[in-house]
């Protein structure tokens, strides 16, 4: 017994010494080590639950994140590639990747305890962060999901049940713009159209000069259908469209829906959080879904679906498309557990908030910086190519459309799809290319546009690289019809 007690005492002393050593390592690394190599020390802090007195937030305004620290946070990006396509898949800084790995290790260390006893509260913490950021009334209005496709399925499958149960009548309609994202259109086809609904597609006449063009087309379409006696059950509206990209006047469009008797409004806001201000009380939609990995620095896959309390407390049957043990316990509960999987991306929201608060002005400061920079770079490119922007600067967020030289011969969606990898493979430029059919068959109008994005890691040289690549193609007499099709 005495020997066992002595052994236990030695182990306690060893544990205390290890803890003290770990504390010293943590404090040293917070001050002196680049975030890209922080995983070992952060793991020590995570497992030993070390509470250092060193504040996470900068003490002084002069301590905001520096350019070199930003580049260090994204040093894992492929070298030599000008990445101006953040809108497609987003980005994740090294400090958040480190937090992601910590959560993965903690779960794997004791899966039963973590998944059964800790996960729910950790996800609730993330949901509360989202709730506060979007100014939702209640955390129960916020469900974390993987992506917009999941959110769209949740909203649209309840319309399919409404048809099946006789709540909707055959021919009742959903209204959307022609620029609605392809995957969401597919969900409308899969759930709404197949159940007997009809689709009203509002023209999106890009390029645009004002919000009034969007509002006018939408109002005309609704008034026309109402005059024909058609019941519009659901409106699907983007907050920030994908391609061509513009910030939609969602508040005005939601108000028109209310005035015209549209029952439900679903906002596809895949590009919104992190690139525009988002306020559920001001927007007033029934459903609002945004990714958090495109512009809010989360790893894939983290998104959310907001369901206004009046919608969740009605007779709507909102369920996650993956049915698991929590079916029937409310959408937030169903979404929190969809079976055994890696939930660690859902848990990094506190670390993301730490990251964005290292910037002057926090997220609002990042939004303004990205908007101002993308407008400046868009104007520079349009001037260099003798073309135009696709919309006024106040109609864009952190992405903007810039016309490409007509001599490139972009005359179809297929041309646009093929030019994109050509620019990447030959020039190391990543952008999204868009084909825009000329309005009313107008000859000589711009039919090719590039969508450029600006995120905090981008440099002016990225956009110069794109400018020079297009100019080189022009000098070489490149055309999509000759070069890409022959390849």
Image (cartoon, grey):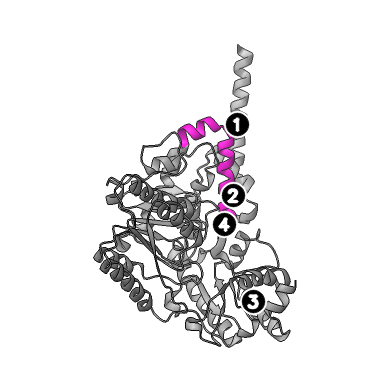
Badge 3, how many Cα within 10 Å: few under 14, some, many 20+? many
Q: Which of the two marks, 1 or 2, is nearer to us in this view?
A: 2
Badge 1, how many Cα within 10 Å: few under 14, some, many 20+? few
Question: Can you give x and y, in whole percent of width and height, for residue 89 in the image?
Answer: 56, 60
Residue annotated with mark 3: 466
Q: Camera-side residue: 245 or 90?
A: 245
In contact (CB < 8 Å): disc 3 and disc 2: no
Badge 4, how many Cα within 10 Å: few under 14, some, many 20+? many
Query: Which numbered disc flags the more N-terminal residue, 1 or 2?
Result: 1
Residue annotated with mark 1: 15
Q: Quadrant of residue 215?
A: bottom left
Which residue occupies 63% across, 56% down? 34
- The reply to whether the magenta stretch includes residue 443 is no
C-alpha distance separating marks 1 and 3? 56 Å
With 79 as the anchor, is 119 left or right in this view?
left
C-alpha distance separating marks 2 and 4? 10 Å
Q: Secondary structure at mark 4?
A: loop
Residue annotated with mark 2: 98
Please say if 360 is above or below 322: below
Q: Camera-side residue: 393 or 11?
A: 393
Query: Which numbered disc flags the more N-terminal residue, 4 or 3?
Result: 4
| Residue 58 visible to the viewer | no
Which contiguous range is marked in magenta?
A: 90-118
Residue annotated with mark 4: 92
With 391 as the anchor, is 310 left or right in this view?
left
Q: Secondary structure at mark 1?
A: helix
Question: Can you give x and y, in whole percent of width and height, for residue 462 in the image?
Answer: 63, 73
In contact (CB < 8 Å): disc 1 and disc 4: no
C-alpha distance separating marks 1 and 4? 35 Å
Q: Which of the two marks, 2 or 4, is nearer to us in this view?
A: 4
Please say if 122 is above or below 179: above
């Amino acid at each position: 017994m005495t020997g066992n007690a002595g052994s236990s005492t030695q182990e306690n002393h060893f544990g205390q010494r290890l803890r003290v050593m770990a504390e010293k390592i943590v404090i040293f690394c917070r001050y002196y080590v680049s975030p890209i190599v922080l995983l070992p020390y952060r793991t020590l802090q995570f497992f030993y639950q070390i509470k250092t007195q060193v504040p996470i937030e900068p003490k002084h305004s002069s301590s905001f994140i520096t350019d070199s620290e930003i580049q260090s946070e994204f040093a894992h990006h492929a070298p030599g590639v000008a990445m101006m396509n953040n809108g497609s898949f987003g980005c994740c800084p090294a400090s958040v990747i480190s937090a992601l790995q910590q959560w993965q290790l903690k779960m794997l260390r004791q899966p039963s305890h973590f998944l059964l006893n800790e996960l729910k509260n950790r996800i609730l913490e993330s949901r509360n962060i989202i709730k506060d950021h979007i100014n939702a009334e209640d955390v129960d209005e916020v469900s974390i999901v993987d992506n917009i496709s999941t959110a769209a399925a949740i909203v649209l499958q309840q319309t399919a049940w409404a048809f099946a149960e006789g709540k909707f009548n055959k021919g009742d309609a959903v209204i959307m713009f022609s620029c609605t994202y392809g995957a969401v259109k597919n969900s409308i086809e899969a759930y709404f159209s197949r159940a007997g609904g009809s689709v009203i597609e509002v023209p999106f006449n890009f390029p645009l000069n004002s919000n009034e063009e969007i509002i006018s087309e939408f109002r005309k379409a609704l008034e026309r259908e109402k005059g024909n006696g058609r019941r519009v059950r659901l409106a699907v509206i983007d907050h920030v469209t994908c391609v061509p990209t513009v910030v939609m006047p969602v508040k005005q469009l939601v108000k028109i829906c209310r005035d015209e008797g549209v029952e439900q409004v679903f906002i596809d806001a895949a590009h919104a959080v992190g690139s525009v201000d988002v306020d559920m009380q001001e927007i007033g939609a029934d459903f609002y879904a945004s990714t958090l990995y495109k512009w809010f620095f989360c790893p894939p896959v983290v998104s959310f679906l907001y369901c206004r309390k009046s919608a969740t407390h009605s007779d709507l049957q909102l369920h996650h498309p993956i049915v698991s043990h929590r079916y029937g316990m409310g959408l937030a509960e169903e979404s929190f557990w969809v079976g055994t999987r890696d939930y660690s991306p859902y848990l990094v929201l506190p670390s993301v908030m730490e990251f964005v608060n290292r910037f002057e002005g926090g997220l609002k400061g990042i939004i303004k910086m990205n908007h101002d920079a993308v407008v400046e770079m868009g104007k520079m490119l349009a001037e260099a190519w003798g073309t135009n922007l696709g919309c006024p600067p106040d109609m864009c967020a952190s992405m903007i459309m810039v016309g490409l030289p007509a001599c490139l011969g972009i005359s179809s969606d297929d041309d646009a799809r093929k030019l994109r990898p050509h620019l990447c493979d030959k020039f190391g430029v990543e952008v999204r290319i868009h084909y825009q059919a000329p309005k009313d068959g107008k000859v000589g109008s711009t039919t090719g546009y590039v969508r450029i994005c600006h995120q905090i890691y981008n440099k002016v040289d990225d956009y110069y690289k794109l400018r020079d690549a297009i100019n080189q193609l022009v000098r070489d007499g490149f055309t999509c019809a000759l070069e890409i099709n022959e390849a």
